[in-house]
Image (cartoon, coloured by chain):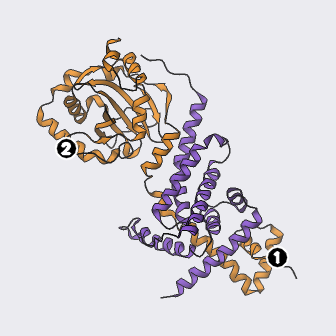
Chain colours: A purple, B orange
Amino acid sequence: MREARPVNASRDKVADLRSEIVALIPRLRRFALGLTRNRDEADDMVQLALERGLARLSHFTIGTRLDSWMFRILQNAWIDLARRRQRDGAPVDLDAIAELTPDALEDAARLSVQREVQQAMTALSADQRALVMLVLVEGYSYQEAADIVEIPVGTVMSRLSRARQILMDRLSVDGERP
Amino acid sequence: MIVVTDEDLMAFADGVLGEAAAAEIAALAAKDPVVAAKIEAFRQSRATLAGAFDAVLTEAVPDRFLASIDHYLPAQATAEVISLDARRKPKAAARFAWPDWRQAAAAAMIAVTAGGVGYWAKPLGDGAAIGLGAASPVLARALDAGQSGQRFAMSSEAGLIPVTSFIDKEARACREFETQGGSSAGAGIACRAADGWRIEAWVAQPTGTTSGGKDFVTVGVGDNPVLNAALAQLGESHLLDGAQEACAIANNWRGDLAACVRAK
């Protein structure tokens, strides 16, 4: 028989960190999907953020919030991508989202909301989209969102209030049309 | 006349304004329909957006994400090592007794259950009778580094335990393993080919069997007809003991495995 290895605290921490990152993936995908409508691009962004985050894991302070940290990295990956798009021209992918779960009726209804929202989000800047997702979808406070995107909370509030008005203008106009 | 900004109205709609300021805005909204409409729009924006993107939350996590995580944060073996003596005993004789028709049936069963191994295997391979394809990076790492009986925690639910190691009739190193975690729970056999670990057979844990937490007794490789048939096809020529297995791990399952066997 083999002898049991002594318990190693740092190993346990690594296992915890791993579980926490795996558990965070669905939310990272949701965030990315709000930033870009293109599903493949959203998942590529998540992949990039995971790689960047994991490579810099030594900079993460255990005990602080991993979710905020990973959202910040994903947000930065998005800003990089948005800048590149501005320079190179954006790939447009309106229909990819329709392939999400095509056979479920409930999902279809839910996805049509998602599609409308995604359509309306195109009127927003990259910064505004991120704030809308962080505060309205992810449920972060203004201050938490400010910490994630690293801008003052006052700026978060002014950008977010503007973004929400644009969104509601778009969504209600669309809703009134037959 | 107080000056009320859109930010104030938004904060009011979000319910994060202090009591005194909230009272002022409520009073203002009561007499100014433009203010009331703005507040309502802010409320609606939250209500509309809140669940708008939730469809993706219930989708399976792509393997490539897990592979990235595994690259930087290898799944760790936990401290406990489970006694496998009971499993090591009923070997060889009974295993090789299955008649040929039963092996064919077993191969068919494996094909049916292969879907569940998704977390552990790459997309299924070339349609060999029993071979299911290359092991995922996650599985490969556990098979490379794990002593039999060590549990590798992949996430809060998923885990993997190498159970035994043996040399097959083609002199390849093979390992029986058990997997835990939802639809990935089961038992299988992988062998080390030149290009890495290949899953030779895998069966899902029968529904109704429980494997909670550290109690990893699931399918039981030793008494599953499908796996026994796969073992019979592979032809177990030598079962590695602990020291031989440690030698094989140290050599990354390559090199002269025969030397590890002789080193007894």
Residue for point 39% across, 70% down: A105
Which mark, residue B24?
1
Name the subunit of mark 1. Answer: B
Residue B82 or residue B107, whichever sits in front:
B107
Q: Pointer 1: residues within 10 angstroms few (<14), some, or many (20+)?
A: few
Q: Nearer the viewer, residue B245 or A78?
A: A78
Image mark 2: chain: B
Residue B33 lies in quadrant: bottom right
Q: Are marks 1 and 2 on the same chain?
A: yes
Q: Residue B70, how many percent across, how many down? A: 48, 41
Q: Position of residue B173 (x, y in %)?
A: 31, 26
Crowd around label 2: few <14 · some 14–19 · many ≥20 (10 Å): some
- Residues marked 1 and 2 touching at CB (< 8 Å): no
Q: Secondary structure at mark 1?
A: helix
Please indicate whether residue A11 sits to the left or right of residue B257 in the image: right
- The answer to whether residue A109 shows anywhere in this view is yes
Instruction: Report x, y in % for residue B72.
Output: 53, 40
Q: Which residue is mark 2?
A: B108
**In the picture provided, is B101 more to the left or to the right than B173?**
left
Residue A164: horizontal and vertical position, in percent?
65, 74
Amino acid carrying label 2: it is: Ala
- What is the count of numbered marks? 2
Asked whether residue B16 appears in the rendered view, the answer is: no
In terms of depth relative to the viewer, which is nearer, B192 or A7? B192
Residue A127 in the image: above or below residue A18:
below
Q: Secondary structure at mark 2?
A: helix
* Amino acid on which the number 1 mark rests in the picture: Glu
